[in-house]
Image (cartoon, rainbow, N blue to C red):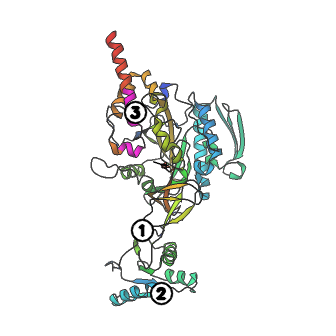
Amino acid sequence: MYNRPVLFDQSTSLVKEFSLLQERSKIAVMFDESGKLQAEAFLKEVNNLPTSSLLVTEWLQDETIREFISSQKIGTQIYIAAKWDTACKIFSMSVEEGASEEEIQTFITDEKKRYVYCMKCFNASEISLDEQTVKCSCGTHLEVGSFFSVVRKGYIGYPFIPVVQRQKVGS
Amino acid sequence: MFTQKLDFKTTDLETFPFPFTTGNYRYSNDLRKLQNINCVEITPEYELQVRTKRRLLEEQPEVRYQSYPHTHEMQWEVLEMLVDMAVSRYPQHFEVIKDGQNWTFKNNILGEVDSFIFGDSSTLELEPFDYIGRHFHNDFVLMVHRDDNFYLEVGQVSYAALFSAHWNKGMSFNEIHGPVPFVSRKGDQLADRIRRFLLSVEPGEPWTRINWNLMANRWDVNYETMDVWGPERDLITPENAGELVRLRVEEQKFYRMPRSNAILFVLNTQFLPLEDLKLRQEWFDLTYSVLQDIPKEMAEYKGIAPYLPQSVEYLRREKEKLKAVENKA
């Protein structure tokens, strides 16, 4: 579906630490090397519940991750502890397999990424978390808006012409 | 290269959907049942508007028209509705011959005849929605009903007011209206209230509401050209506001499509220069009263804040002139 949720810097899925939801009776944890500590600590905390876990290594095939997700029972709460790019991949696969955003908690172990969608050239490009204005590779200056599109996978970039400050020459 | 020249205005005031009924305006759920359910309307500006719309669609196809491939069946339903409405209301201007699935549509105003197989998109040069939309001056947006919400899956938009078919493609009604900062008297989000209302719209019983804005020497203001029209707003002065600032009125009509269950938004956008408001004293007075009472956040949201004071000042001066004439008499 074209408008499935995507992971972005303000996703409701993002958490600073995992929490157990009372209505969930089973949990599945997926993590990479960087999220191992977080994942293992959480698994220890919930050892009275049925759990399953998967270490997502660089060489692990996407099909294996997908099979792990699709084998989970309906109502399973999904936990992801990984670097941004890996987390995005696992998040997208989980959504494609039928999980809702509310059913996924994501813990990021490195920097979150943010994208701006240029309204001139219609391409998304990565920007830092605090940039308010950027110059697109097409040459357009963009003001980064707060309006996000899951279809365009970025924040809206409003084109603007920067005001050029005249330099004072001499005294 | 995209060009835009504001070269038309409403000349038949009887067809101008003047938006104000009182001297102060606030956002509200002002939907009402549509009296004449036929949305096809031929104004004196029809040919000029349609040709300009077609030019914009040619120059900026990515900006002006968006659709998903799975929508073709829904698009044919819209085509059928608009063809039937056009022929029914203006038989002198539009004709259709239906020989089973073999249709021939004639637009006598533009002198065009097209034959196609109804339901077979390969027999048209454009997608059905894009094709039929180019015969009318309106903007058309098809919102597909799913999970108690409406999703923009087809849009042909040439008169945008801070809107973009490209950017808003695939968004839900709530996402599109996310930037709308207004709440109702009860405190609930206005956009969400309208969405809930739209859920109850039934086939054969369309509804309507009127939206308005001001335009500074522009046909439309979309996100894609913000770098152009943004600075141009600063060029408005009380001296040129009468000619360059236009009251932009968007008559929105909402149709529940019986087969797809989608809602078709038909938008009739008309413009009247502030100086032409003097042709109807009541309109002039109401507009002056409304504009001088616009809250700051509403002016910011509508994108008119940079030239609203100049526009109000123009109207004030004109009112003074009128008073002076009346006093003399």
Q: CA distance from mark 1 to mark 3?
A: 42 Å
At label 2, the amino acid type is Glu
Disc 3, SS: helix
Q: Which chain is home to disc 2?
A: A
- Which secondary structure type mostly characterizes the magenta part of the structure? helix
Query: Earlier along the polypeptide chain: callout 1 or callout 2?
Result: 1
Residue receiving disc 1: A11
Percent across and percent down for residue B99 are 71, 42
Q: Which residues are magenta?
A: B298-315
Asked if disc 1 and disc 3 are in contact, CB closer than 8 Å, the reply is no
Residue A21 on the magenta span: no
Q: Which chain is home to disc 3?
A: B
The reply to the same-chain question for discs 1 and 3 is no
Asked if disc 2 and disc 3 are in contact, CB closer than 8 Å, the reply is no
Residue receiving disc 2: A33
Q: Is residue A27 left or right of residue B81?
A: left
Q: Can residue B314 be seen?
A: yes
At label 3, the amino acid type is Gln
Residue receiving disc 3: B310
Query: Looking at the image, which residue sits at the far top?
Result: B329
Q: Which chain is home to disc 1?
A: A
Disc 1, SS: loop
- Judged by depth in the image, the label closer to the viewer, 1 or 3, is 3
> Where A83 falls versus B106 (above or below)?
below
Percent across and percent down for residue B162 are 47, 46
